[in-house]
């Protein structure tokens, strides 16, 4: 059996070590900062309109806002989107985008319906970001010639992509 004095000494040493480690400053992941900075074109407060085909095949319009900001010492991007159609909230989502170690991005999405998921995102050129909720659905975000956020959603049918969603937002600040 261990002596009581030895156990107390061990606990004290362990406690001091843990407190000491916790007080050491963390270092920022510089690679993550560089990769996430490629999405700077999305930052800011945005407002505009869009349309989506409903499950019934009806094209419905909506008003949309997006608030996008760097978080976590510039290693993550927080995206908050809210869409309203005919006075009813139809979209309320939160996404956290972080770079992965393979040169792509993790796109973690949380919807007000309770659904969530981790999806792949990738840059396909300057100011051109794709994210994929499934292998058959993709969203493409870019800045158009007017500097507006232009996003479209497409669904794959066979070898072709069918557009089911589009929005254009103006930057407020």
Image (spheres, helix red, strand yellow):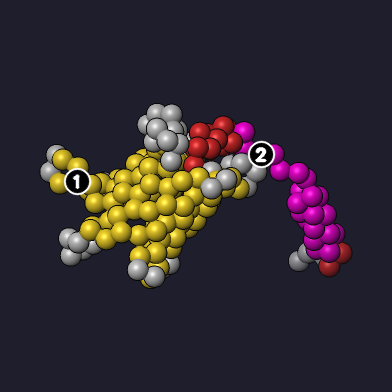
Question: Disc 1 designates what residue?
Answer: 162
Tell me what residue is drawn at x 30 percent, y 59 percent.
Answer: 61
Residues shaded magenta: 6-30
Residue closest to the eye, 63 or 18: 63
Residue at disc 2, secondary structure? loop
Tell me what residue is drawn at x 42 percent, y 43 percent.
Answer: 149
The alpha-carbon separation of the residues under discs 1 and 2 comes to 41 Å
Residue 20 highlighted magenta (yes or no):
yes
Find residue 132 and report its horizontal and vertical position in percent.
33, 46
Find residue 23 and report its horizontal and vertical position in percent.
79, 50
Tell me what residue is drawn at x 56 percent, y 32 percent.
Answer: 34
Q: Residue furthest bottom?
A: 88
Q: Would residue 97 be seen by someone viewing this image from the given angle?
A: no
Tell me what residue is drawn at x 87 percent, y 64 percent.
Answer: 5
Residue 92 horizontal side relative to residue 165, left or right: right
In front of the other: label 1 or label 2?
1
């Amino acid at each position: 059996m261990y002596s009581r004095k030895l156990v107390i000494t061990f606990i004290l040493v362990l406690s001091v070590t843990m407190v000491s480690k916790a007080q050491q400053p963390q270092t920022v992941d510089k690679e993550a900062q560089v990769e996430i900075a490629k999405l700077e074109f999305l930052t800011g407060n945005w407002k505009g309109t869009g349309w989506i085909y409903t499950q019934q095949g009806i094209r419905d319009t909506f008003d949309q806002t997006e608030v996008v900001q760097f978080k976590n010492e510039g290693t993550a991007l927080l995206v908050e989107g809210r869409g309203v159609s005919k006075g009813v909230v139809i979209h309320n989502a939160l996404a956290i985008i972080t770079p992965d170690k393979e040169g792509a991005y993790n796109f973690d999405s949380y919807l007000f319906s309770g659904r969530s998921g981790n999806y792949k995102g990738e840059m396909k050129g300057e100011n051109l970001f794709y994210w994929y909720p499934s292998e058959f659905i993709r969203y493409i975000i870019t800045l158009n010639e007017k500097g507006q956020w232009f996003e479209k959603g497409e669904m794959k049918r066979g070898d072709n992509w069918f557009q089911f969603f589009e929005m254009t937002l103006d930057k407020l600040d």
